[in-house]
Amino acid sequence: MSRKLGLERDTNETSIALELDIDGSGNYDIDTGIGFFNHMLEGFARHGLFDLVLRVKGDIEVDAHHTVEDTGIALGAAFAEALGEKEGIARFGTFILPMDDALVLASLDFSGRPYLAFEADLTAPLLGTMETETVREFFAGFVNGAAINLHIRQIAGENTHHIVEAMFKAFAKALDLATRIDPRIEGVLSTKGVL
């Protein structure tokens, strides 16, 4: 079963085109117009072992908000579409990732019900040209696009760059675990029969 697709999303604020292969090997070609955001998404693809080609043109002359949030929405929607009815997937994924002084937990459920719990102390207002308050907006966008339940929590850390990078990598690892096919699962992993 192929779990790859292409997706385009256009609004008055952003134009997004992406190609995703959930069962990839971590290859990426990413250009969002925001250097730090590129770096985070490259780590996401590499550590989640997702192949990702992504092109984003956004109103970054205003700020990074629309570009970051809309990319989250589009990427989440791509995962949801690629997984289809979610038959055979493990559904849940949790990962605690260390990065130097930072320690971050990411835990998620492909429940079909969007919910985000985000706890972090991001003291630096900017990372490159990306406002750190947009980090939460990326995850909120992904949650809404994919209809998942996601908890991200900073357990330790002082360096904002390390904390945010640990978030993206922990999320990728948890996502990899949740999207894996388990041959023991018949249909979907739910007593309701649907996700």
Image (spheres, rainbow, N blue to C red):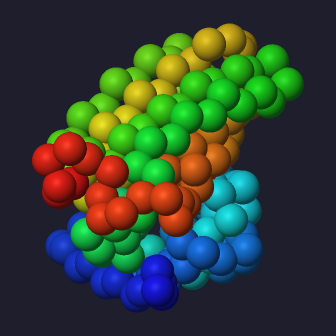
Image spot of residue 73 (x, y percent): 30, 59
| Nearer to the camera, 142 or 63 | 142
Residue most extreme to the right? 100
Q: Which residue is drawn at 42% across and 58% down?
A: 185
Image spot of residue 125 (x, y percent): 53, 27
115 lies above or below 192: above
Decide if residue 159 is in sight here: no
**Apparent side of residue 102 relative to residue 185 in the rendered image (left or right):** right
Image spot of residue 139 (x, y percent): 39, 43
Q: Which residue is drawn at 80% across and 30% down?
A: 99
Image spot of residue 188 (x, y percent): 30, 58
| Nearer to the camera, 37 or 96 | 96
Picture quarter with the C terminus: bottom left
**Apparent side of residue 85 relative to residue 182 in the rendered image (left or right):** left
Q: Which residue is drawn at 49% across and 59% down?
A: 184
- Residue 114 falls in image quadrant: top left
Q: Count the numbered circles shown.
A: 0
**Apparent side of residue 126 relative to residue 186 in the rendered image (left or right):** right
| Nearer to the camera, 6 or 32 | 6
- Residue 34 falls in image quadrant: bottom right
65 lies above or below 149: below
Decide if residue 121 is in sight here: yes
135 lies above or below 102: below
**Apparent side of residue 14 relative to residue 179 in the rendered image (left or right):** left
Q: Residue at x 38, y 76 (%)?
A: 82
83 lies above or below 35: below
